[in-house]
Amino acid sequence: MIKIQDATLNLPILQRVQKRSFAAGGIFLALCIGGALSNPDQFFRSYLFAFVFWSGIPLGSLAILMLQYLTGGAWGIMIRRLLEASTRTLPILAALFVPIFFGMQHLYEWAQPEKVKADKILQHKAPYLNIPFFALRTVVYFLAWYSLIYFFNKWSQQQDDNKAAQTKFNAESLSGPGLVIFGATATFASFDWVMSLEPHWYSTIFGMYYMIGQTLTTFSFTILVLILLAERKPLSEVLSPEHLHDLGKLTLAFVMIWAYLSFSQFLIIWSGNLPEETPYYLKRLANGWWWLQLALILFHFALPFILLLSRSLKRAPRQLIKVASLILFMRLIDLFLLIAPTGHDGHFRIHWMDLAALLGIGGVWLGVFCRTLITRPVLPVHDPAFEEALQGGH
């Protein structure tokens, strides 16, 4: 039996990353503000792209956390505290969403009265797609997510302080209804924030596609952080190849689900050949964008799928972290394709504010993540299933 003397991470490197992330985030956000003065349309589109990517990690962490409480598994015990640390960054992301409220007329056609007056479809959708209702829904989304995060983290803290087994029962009991609440709110958030960028287009599976993407982003990020921290105590004492193997298998499963949903959405819309739907893909298959589509097929699905079939790769930290990093980068490409082609002449380009916003919001978020990670134990040593998890139990 392995006895963990101290499950808290007290690493100077995390403190250095925290300080440097905050500094870099502040610098790049300041550059974005300067760019907004000359090109507000591009600023808000770049800002939304960055926000959607980074918000996917805490939201995906919440979904995986509830899924693990329902299903169990040693893999979840090893990453639970990392997931919880990610979820506790949600308040800063709520604050970072505020600029989007001020840029709605630069982002969304339905927020521009003159375009609504000239478009019957936008008029038909106006009872749902309007600024006050959009703002209200967004507030409801964040309140619902924060409520779930509050209780899971509260019970986690009580488990560390009081060693109470009841807290795990509470978390398991909330996870079922919580997943239903999360599924509904995340689906409508994806409609509001991303799909309504092109309000004539719609997809009934877009919400699921969006959530699976968030989950895949979270798994990739969490694997990367877990392996980077695994060389130091206390993770070095408990993390085994079996745990990595399980995480690799789950990543493979979500890669396949993402590919299935992506292809299904394309096939249904393309075969339907409706004039209000096919332009969405026509825009993304021309003027240079098709290179990114090809990259998604090759490097978001085909290559990770082939590599993650290997049992030895999934058990090798250095190899698994490379695959996780590749998937994380391709998640950026996927979200960029959803957002960037809207709102300009349709030709492929990467603006400097796309990178600056990504690094700006990412720097702030990563700094908050590091700060939350070092304030609590990184392992749930008082969880009733912890001893079994140390043995690599599934």
Image (spheres, rainbow, N blue to C red):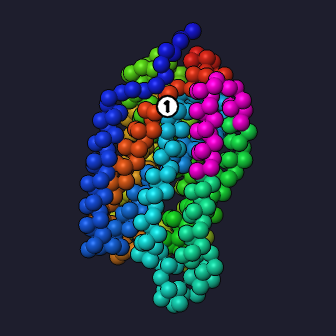
**Number of disc labels:** 1
**Residue displayed at 64% across by 79% down:** 127
Count neighbours of disc 1 (C-alpha within 10 A) and say few if under 14, some if 14 to 19, many if 20 or more. Answer: some
Q: Is residue 256 visible?
A: no
Task: Give the image location of residue 390, x and y in percent.
Answer: 57, 18
Q: Residue furthest top?
A: 1
Helix, strand or loop: magenta stretch:
helix
The residue under label 1 is 376
* Extent of the magenta region: 146-170
Magenta-span inclusion, residue 157: yes
Please determine whether, in this image, residue 132 is positioned above or below residue 3: below
**Residue displayed at 64% across by 23% down:** 163
Task: Give the image location of residue 200, x and y in percent.
Answer: 55, 76
Q: Nearer the viewer, residue 117 or 296?
A: 117
Q: Quadrant of the N terminus?
A: top right
Please determine whether, in this image, residue 310 is positioned above or below residue 51: above
**Residue displayed at 40% across by 48% down:** 365
Q: Nearer the viewer, residue 44 or 200?
A: 44
Q: State left or right for residue 221 relative to residue 388.
A: left
